[in-house]
Image: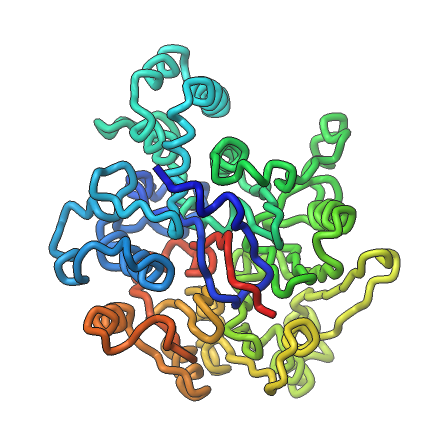
Amino acid sequence: MINTSTLLENIQVDSEVGRLRRLLIHSPDRGLGKVVPSKAQDWLFEDIVHLATMRREEYDYYVKLLLYFLDPDKIKGRVKAIDADLSRSFYKPGTPEYFNSDRVIDVQTLLAEILEQAVIRTKLTAAICGIERCSYHIQAELGTYDPAELAKIFLSGSLPDERMLFAPLPNLIFTRDIGIVINDHILLNKPAKSARTRESLLAQYVFFHHPIFANYQDKIIEIPDNEHHFLLPDDEKHSDYNRTTLEGGDVMMVAPRHLLIGCSERTTLYAAQQVMKVLFERAVVDTITIIKIPKKRDYMHIDTLFTQVKKNMWVLLSSLGRQGDEAKKRDLLHFFAPQAFDHDLRIMQFKKGQEHKPVDIENLEDLLTDISRKDLGSTEPVQFIYSGNKEFPFGDREQWTDSCNLLALQDGVVIGYDRNDKTLEAFRNAGFRVVKAVDLLEQFEQGVLAPDTLTDTFIMLPSAELSRARGGSHCMSMPILREAVL
């Protein structure tokens, strides 16, 4: 059981780079091994993945790193000894050997714990069977499993004997998309795709019923739908002006009083407007900047285009910054075929009490520079690392494999993928130490380095399988506690 005593009073995120102290994750479960080619895109995957490789050779290093930075007492044994244990039970929720940290928390653990309550188990089973159109006999059969196994079934869609009851939830490894902490409030998201409907339901039950969130019930925000959406014609229900969908990759808490919301293929303008209304009414933030990006599969969320590395540094896709503007000016085709260069990017900033007077911001780099200087008080020059080191065609290639999707463990220490060579070169040129995850872990074990002593470090996570899932380390995390950035 998660130790709730240290969590009840500690949910707070006011930046992207304050020292990370607690987060929600979800390790790849058996459902990922059930994705078939014919359904991959419907389930929001570009390809099928090899589950054993993703677990043992990639994601488990991510978990080890998180434990070293957040909860080192829960690490059992050295890297090589743990790797030799092919059962991997140390990393699997629901096993006796599971590390069970109250700082690196798997959503599956929380789900299993609320399912120990008979009333919740009955209600949630009925709700899921209704969504998935299960027979009454299936619903009755689910009632025979213990909470830990039932949690696995709800997440993977399959029974212990490998029979599949319904679709898996392969995207739950991207816990950022189920919710986000904004100061001391929790915003529950509303996924755009039907493949993630069950995720949203499970998240509701976890946040409203697990005791670690007991003191935050009045601070959990659910985005309201258009109150008359059921009366709208079918073609209007799916309009961005009526549809309420929002995912966590489009929400960034960049400073104590400043929130970014992206409008993308997954997050609608209507949803952004509803979030802004609620947050301003509750005085949670004073400034909300809405960033409208192209509705393209390769962009998806704003955190696939840029993330923060440290107070005065960001990584981003150059075509959406000043570099992209300069390319337009230099190319004569811009005058004759503007659609070839038009990224349909628009940035508008809203202040509490002056919502009717938004400010247009011309360039993404102008916005990020302003955040670093004015919101975070950085006195150093603001720097930008560009995907693919601004070299064609590597900027777009590496953005596709999440070169711009980094998780800051603390100011200037980030986790990213090892495959984005040109972007890594740009980090080296900026003075960063670029180190493989396994090498860094061994240095921690030997006492050569300690997490608290690291500065300006890019930690390379193995990524052959993880990158196929179309999400990086930023996506694979839902921070619920960071140290104050100011």
Q: Residue furthest front?
A: 5
How many circles with numbers are drawn on the protein?
0
What residue sits 38% from the left and 45% below the top? 106
Q: Quadrant of residue 444?
A: bottom left
Residue nearest the observer in this picture, 375 or 199:
375
Which quadrant of the rendered structure holds the N terminus? top left
Q: Nearer the viewer, residue 103 or 42?
A: 103
Place of residue 154 in the rendered image (x, y in percent of width and height, measured from the top left) = 38, 30
Measured as percent of width and height from the top left, residue 215 is found at: 57, 39
Q: Is residue 365 above or below residue 289?
A: below
Going 66% across and 88% down the picture, which residue do you hit? 330
From the viewer's perspective, tell me whether residue 325 is left or right of residue 445. Answer: right
Q: Left of 165 or right of it: where is 341?
A: right
Does the image show residue 237?
yes
Residue 414 x %, y %: 42, 70
Quarter the C terminus occupies: bottom right
For the question of whether residue 367 can be seen, the reply is: no
Drawn side of residue 321 relative to residue 107, left or right: right
In the rendered view, tell whether residue 264 sits above or below residue 404: above
Q: Quadrant location of residue 326?
A: bottom right
Q: Residue at x 16, y 56 (%)?
A: 82
Q: Position of residue 266 (x, y in %)?
A: 59, 49
Tell me: residue 343, above or below residue 1. below
Indicate left or right for 463 with 186 as reference.
Answer: left
Depth check, front residue: 65 or 435: 65
